[in-house]
């Protein structure tokens, strides 16, 4: 590392330390948080320092708790609280950024594999019309919504009942396929791949076999 690089890193570290200690003005802190979001170098450096600090805090948490409890001098307590809050703020910013990027990557991966389920085509009075309408509604929600917890809770028991309950047998592939997509959007990649592999095994020499194989390859690259 040459001298210019050392100066540059020292300057970044000084700003990070100032932020973590709560020494920035409101305007400086707002600008710094925005820069963390936009500048990968600053974000990575901040997270590295913050992770180090957090590790030290975890190791010394009992000792710090004792100090805070026994020390009645507020001037001693305030810097510790500022430090802890600032560390938490950095993790919240970083986690939010990571989670947003991850979701967009997962959604982009599955978006070519959605199917449209038109409930207007369901004939009224059919014995299974209510069942089909419910399934189609779930499938469409998987495409439209961001949170998958509700859809997964509903589809998992239906999928698990397919081998012994023929109520949903005619829609088995759609159920399996859409549950796999929901798992992907929920970042449960292993569960999605497991379902897709079973779809392949049950649908040799069919278009769904090829689709499942293609999506598995994409998921393995994530």
Image (cartoon, rainbow, N blue to C red):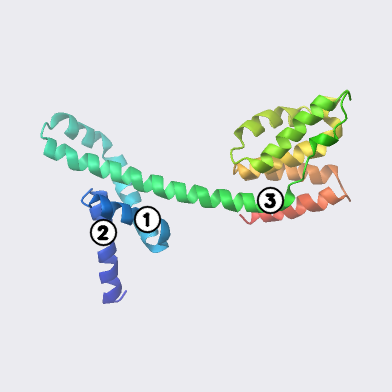
How far, Cα to Cα, is label 2 from label 1? 13 Å
Q: Is the residue under label 1 in contact with that under label 2 (CB below 8 Å)?
A: no
Which residue is identified by label 2?
A: 15
- Determine which of the numbered discs, if any, sits on residue 34 in the image: 1
Quadrant in the picture for the N terminus: bottom left
Residue 97 visible in the shown view: yes
| Residue 97 located left or right of residue 85 | right
Residue drawn at x 79%, y 43% is: 199
Residue drawn at x 82%, y 29% is: 168
- Is label 1 in a helix, a strand or a loop? helix
Q: Which mark lies nearer to you, 3 or 2?
A: 3
Residue 40's place in the image compared with 24, above or below, is: below
How far, Cα to Cα, is label 3 from label 1? 30 Å
Q: Which class describes the residues within 10 Å of circle 3: few (<14), some (14-19), or many (20+)? A: few
Q: Position of residue 131 (x, y in %)?
A: 80, 26
Which residue is identified by label 3?
A: 111
């Amino acid at each position: 590392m040459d001298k210019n690089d050392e100066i540059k890193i020292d300057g970044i570290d000084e700003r990070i330390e100032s932020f973590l200690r709560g020494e920035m003005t409101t305007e400086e802190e707002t600008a710094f948080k925005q820069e963390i979001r936009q500048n990968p170098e600053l974000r990575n450096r901040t997270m590295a320092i913050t992770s180090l600090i957090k590790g030290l805090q975890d190791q010394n948490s009992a000792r710090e708790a004792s100090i805070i409890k026994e020390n009645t001098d507020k001037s001693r307590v305030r810097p510790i609280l500022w430090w802890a809050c600032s560390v938490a703020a950095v993790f919240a910013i970083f986690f939010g950024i990571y989670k947003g990027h991850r979701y967009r990557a997962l959604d982009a991966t599955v978006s070519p594999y959605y199917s449209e389920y038109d409930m207007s085509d369901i004939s009224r009075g059919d014995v299974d019309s209510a069942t089909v309408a419910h399934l189609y509604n779930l499938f469409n929600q998987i495409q439209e919504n961001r949170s998958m917890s509700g859809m997964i809770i509903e589809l998992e028991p239906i999928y698990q009942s397919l081998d012994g309950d023929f109520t949903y047998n005619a829609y088995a592939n759609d159920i399996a396929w859409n549950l796999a997509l929901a798992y992907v959007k929920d970042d449960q990649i292993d569960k999605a791949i497991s379902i897709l592999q079973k779809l392949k095994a049950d649908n040799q020499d069919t278009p769904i076999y090829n689709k499942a194989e293609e999506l598995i390859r994409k998921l393995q690259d994530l």
